[in-house]
Amino acid sequence: MKSMNRREWLKSTGKIAAAAAVAPLVFSSMAEAGTAGGLQSKSSVSYQDHPSGKDMCSNCAHFVPGASPSADGACKVVAGKISPHGYCFAYTPISS
């Protein structure tokens, strides 16, 4: 077994401490990304249940309509129930 001098020991200890400090951030973002089959959380795309001008979920390529035009639907990008009148940063207008 190789003996370590003080400098080597401090370097290795510093790397371990840095990894321990970063690990919770990495694992929490991985867990969030893995939520609901890889869909984004509403907070990560700044979802709101009202439109942004004329831009709204019912006019978005990612929106999956509900049972009626006014019923909540789903989204191909965002997890959870989505209002047809909602809006988020993942908004992509339906191309004509």
Image (cartoon, grey):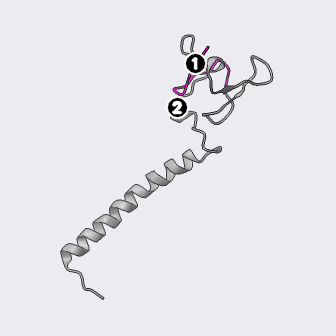
Locate the C terminus and report the quarter of the image it occupies. Answer: top right
Locate the N terminus and report the quarter of the image it occupies. Answer: bottom left
Q: Identify which amino acid the numbered label 1 is placed on.
A: Pro
Q: Position of residue 61 (x, y in %)?
A: 62, 23
Circle 1 packing at 10 Å, graded few (<14), some (14-19), many (20+), is some
Which residue is drawn at the image coordinates 61% and 45% (left, top)?
35
Which residue is drawn at the image coordinates 51% and 26% (left, top)?
89
Q: Position of residue 80 (x, y in %)?
A: 67, 35
Mark 1 or mark 2: which comes first in sequence?
2
The magenta span reads 83-96
Which residue is drawn at the image coordinates 25% and 85% (left, top)?
3
Q: Is residue 67 above or below residue 96?
A: below
Q: Is residue 6 above or below residue 67?
A: below
Report which residue position mark 1 lands on: 93
Report which residue position mark 2 lands on: 45
Is residue 93 within the magenta segment?
Answer: yes
Which residue is drawn at the image coordinates 45% and 55% (left, top)?
24
